[in-house]
Structure formats: C-alpha cells, structure tokens
Amino acid sequence: MRLTEAQQERYARHLLLDELGGEGQERLLSSCVHVRGTGRAARWAARYLAASGIGALVLDDPAAAVECRQLSPEARILSPADLDRRPDLDLDVGASALAASRESPAELGAMAALRALRQLGRP
C-alpha cells in the first residue's frame, strides 16, 4: 500500500519519525483497533488512534464514533454490532488485533497498547 499525496501531507510529521516513517504509517493505515468500553478514557484513546491514521476503529462508545468520524473521515468506524451483522467485512491486518481485543483488559494487561505501538517502530 502506498500513501496518497493527501495522506503524505496529513501524516507528514509521522513520516519524519525514525520510529514510524512511511512503512509504519502504511501499517497503521491498514490496521484495525477495537477500543473497548465507554467513557472519557475510551473516547480519548479513540481520538488519538483516529488522528494517528488507524485504518479502521471498532468502538463500543457511540459518542466516540461521532468524534472520530470528524477527526478522520477516511477511517472506517464500526461498532461491535456492525461486525456481528457483517461477518464479510474485510479488516485485513486488524483481524488478529480484533480477536485479541475480545479478551478482557485484565487478560491483555495495561501495557498491551504500548507493546502494540512499539511493534510498529523499526528495530
């Protein structure tokens, strides 16, 4: 997947980061993240993920979905019900992240998101 000119402009600062760069940004754009729960923490997490260029977000909080659609119009914003109704949805790289997100937060651990973000960086 190649970044479009508009994406290069939007994520220009991300592309300058040694830890992320073009390859990392492309991986972000092709990924899917399920933000579990509702409330402030979930909304802030969803906001930052949408702004970072995540390709698809699955959100439990309807209010967060509205905010994320405004922040990142090109991102696919889904609810868990969308996934139940549409098993044919192609979430590409996000399928493994989605399966992992069905575990409880206690099983995943508090550092799960940080570990996932570190994997995007270059060694």
Image: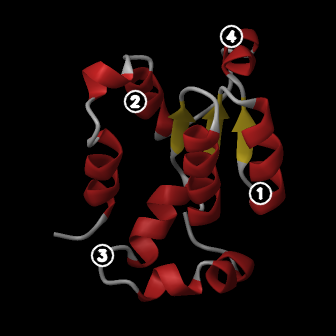
Which element carries disc 1, helix, strand or loop? loop
Residue labelled with disc 1:
74
Three-letter amino acid code of the residue under disc 4: Asp
Residue 54 visible? The answer is no
- Residue 8, percent across and down? 63, 82
Q: Are marks 2 and 3 in contact (CB under 8 Å)?
A: no
Residue drawn 61% across the image and 47% down it: 46
- Residue 60, percent across and down? 66, 26
Q: Are marks 3 and 4 in contact (CB under 8 Å)?
A: no
Badge 2 local density, few (<14 within 10 Å), some, or many (20+)? few
Tell me if residue 102 comes above or below residue 63 in the rendering.
Answer: above
Q: Is residue 6 left or right of residue 55?
A: right
Residue labelled with disc 2:
96
Residue labelled with disc 4:
84
Residue labelled with disc 3:
19
Three-letter amino acid code of the residue under disc 1: Glu
Q: Earlier in the sequence, mark 3 or mark 4?
A: 3
Q: Earlier in the sequence, mark 2 or mark 3?
A: 3
Badge 3 local density, few (<14 within 10 Å), some, or many (20+)? some
C-alpha distance separating marks 1 and 4 = 22 Å
The image quarter containing residue 37 is top right
Residue drawn 54% across the image and 51% down it: 30
C-alpha distance separating marks 3 and 1 = 24 Å
Three-letter amino acid code of the residue under disc 3: Glu
Q: Earlier in the sequence, mark 2 or mark 1?
A: 1
Three-letter amino acid code of the residue under disc 2: Ser
C-alpha distance separating marks 3 and 4 = 35 Å
